[in-house]
Image (tube, helix red, strand yellow):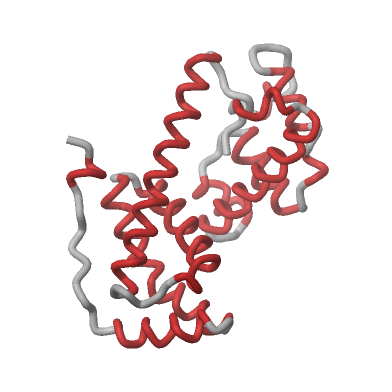
Amino acid sequence: MDTMTSLELPISPLGDEPKLEELVARAREGSQTAFDALASRVRDRVRAWAARLTDDHDDAEDVAQLVLLRLHRQVAEFEGRSRFTTWLYAVTKRVVLSKRARDRRRDALAMARGDELVPHAPDSTVGEPGAGHELMTLVVSYLNVLSGRERDVFELGDLRGMNASEIAERLGVKAVTVRTQLMRARRKIRLRMLEEHPDLLEDYRE
């Protein structure tokens, strides 16, 4: 049975529920300070839900980041008809479902093509002729649209195949920062590709 359909986590009231409701009310009114405090309080809870739903630590980190980004956009939509934590769990589940569907599409495309648009390669082989070389060259030509940190993270992650923890240690930042910067870098390159090579866009991973 599919984990997502069989697993419904119990969302029981916790001692900080009144404080969360207070922060939500202030965040809805536009208080960035209140939102930052709210995000800090719920981050570990969202990560734990995501870990149970995805059964993958790295995916859980990505989901938690996406949920907090969505929370920032949608907190004003919370009307208080249920507990905030119940609503937040529903948001987390929708993000997981969306990510799962996106990953399935990406994997299907990768299987159909036999390679990825940005193949991981060690330093000694980057730029050498071979499978995916033309597509890699195209992506590399877009590095100028990235900020310095975005470029560093993208080169280490998508061009050299390092994982978030390795990049974080190399650059002296947190792994969650690496994931955020990598997501932004991919989005910028994706947008540039949309402008110049829309026929390749659907093959490029988000």
Left or right placement of residue 113 versus residue 39 in this view: right
Say which quadrant the C terminus sits in.
top right
Rendered location of residue 63, percent (x, y): 43, 53
Q: Tell me the residue at 63%/53% (across/down).
A: 181
Q: Tell me the residue at 42%/30% (across/down).
A: 104
Q: Tell me the residue at 40%/87% (across/down).
A: 22
Residue 197 occupies which quadrant of the picture? top right
Is 166 drawn above or below residue 13 in the view shown?
Answer: above
Rendered location of residue 96, percent (x, y): 38, 48
Q: Is residue 121 visible?
A: no
Residue 127 occupies which quadrant of the picture? top right
Left or right placement of residue 133 versus residue 102 in this view: right
Left or right placement of residue 197 versus residue 65 in this view: right
Q: Is residue 116 visible?
A: yes
Say which quadrant the N terminus sits in.
top left
Rendered location of residue 186, percent (x, y): 65, 42
Query: How many labels, in total?
Result: 0
Is 74 drawn above or below residue 135 in the view shown?
Answer: below
**Viewer-proximal residue, 100 or 137?**
100
Rendered location of residue 67, percent (x, y): 45, 59
Q: Tell me the residue at 42%/72% (across/down).
A: 78
